[in-house]
Image: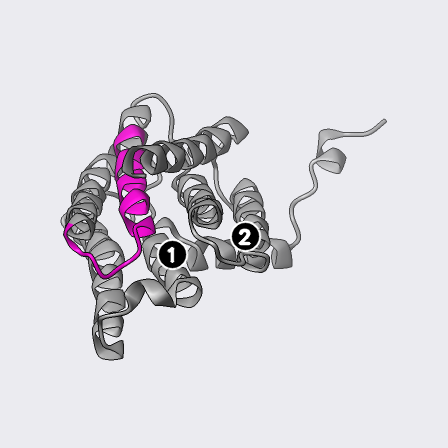
Amino acid sequence: MVTNSTMEKPHPSIVKYIGHLLSYVFHPIFIPTYFFLYLMQVLPFEFVGITEWQLKMRLFSVAWLTAFFPAFAVFLLWRLKFSDSIFLRTQKERIIPYVITMFFYWWMYYLSRNFTDQPIALKFFYLGIFVASAIGMTVNNFMKVSLHAMGIAGMTTAIALVSIFYPVNNALWLPLAILIAALVISARMVVSDHSNKELVVGAAIGVGTQLAAYLWVI
């Protein structure tokens, strides 16, 4: 007779280590920076008119506004005892970080509308992640939707949409993005307490909002 203890074998430590590593490296706050780096590689002609130094400063500003400030805000919330940890394990702890990231994503979208020397892909991407955050905060009232799934699925969709809008060769980047998305979502199945439903809903929000933003902007 097979017992529950025999059937429910723990994941090997190496699998959990890789899962945590993927979760940290592809944390949602880094997604805008990664997407900007991707555009720098595949659409250099869209940045013509600005110097290399200015381009690096724009990359820095993306990382500063969409990664550092949200992370610092979460740190302050933890130190001020508004949350039990920086990992935001409960739905209640995620409300204020949602609002903070929504503000910065809206600000990036607003700025992108006024820049004529950068890819239009940034406009629909920023709009998409802003709307995704708004929907995610709403859905957060009912379930702890996966932010990792939302972010990585959104970026993968945006990369696919770049292939549609621009005459570029995405033969390397799109399969790589799909592979990373599959690995990150699989990692969250292993190392997080998210249900499959929360992961699927997060991915659906990420995909749907990028598609909607693309149709709106283009």
* Horizontal and vertical percent position of residue 42: 44, 63
* Horizontal and vertical percent position of residue 154: 41, 42
Q: Is residue 22 left or right of residue 36?
A: right
Q: Is residue 22 left or right of residue 4?
A: left
The correct choice, above or below, for 107 with respect to 35 in the image is above
> In the rendered image, which quarter is residue 57 located in?
bottom left
> In the rendered image, which residue does mark 2 sit on?
174
> In the rendered image, which residue does mark 1 sit on?
35
* Residue 154 in sight: yes
The correct choice, above or below, for 70 with respect to 88 in the image is below
Distance in Å between CA atoms under marks 1 and 2: 12 Å
Q: Secondary structure at mark 1?
A: helix
Q: Nearer the viewer, residue 139 or 155?
A: 155
* Horizontal and vertical percent position of residue 63: 26, 62
Residue 79 is covered by the magenta coloring: no
What residue is rendered at 42% in x and 67% in y?
41
Q: Residue lying furthest top in this view? A: 142
**Considering the image in quadrants, where does the C terminus appear?**
top left
What residue is rendered at 54% in x and 58% in y?
169
Q: Nearer the viewer, residue 75 or 138?
A: 138
Report the span colored magenta. 114-135
Determine crowd level at label 2: few under 14, some 14-19, many 20+ residues with C-alpha closer than 10 A.
some
Residue 118 is covered by the magenta coloring: yes
Colour setup of the view: one colour
Give amino acid for label 2.
Answer: Leu
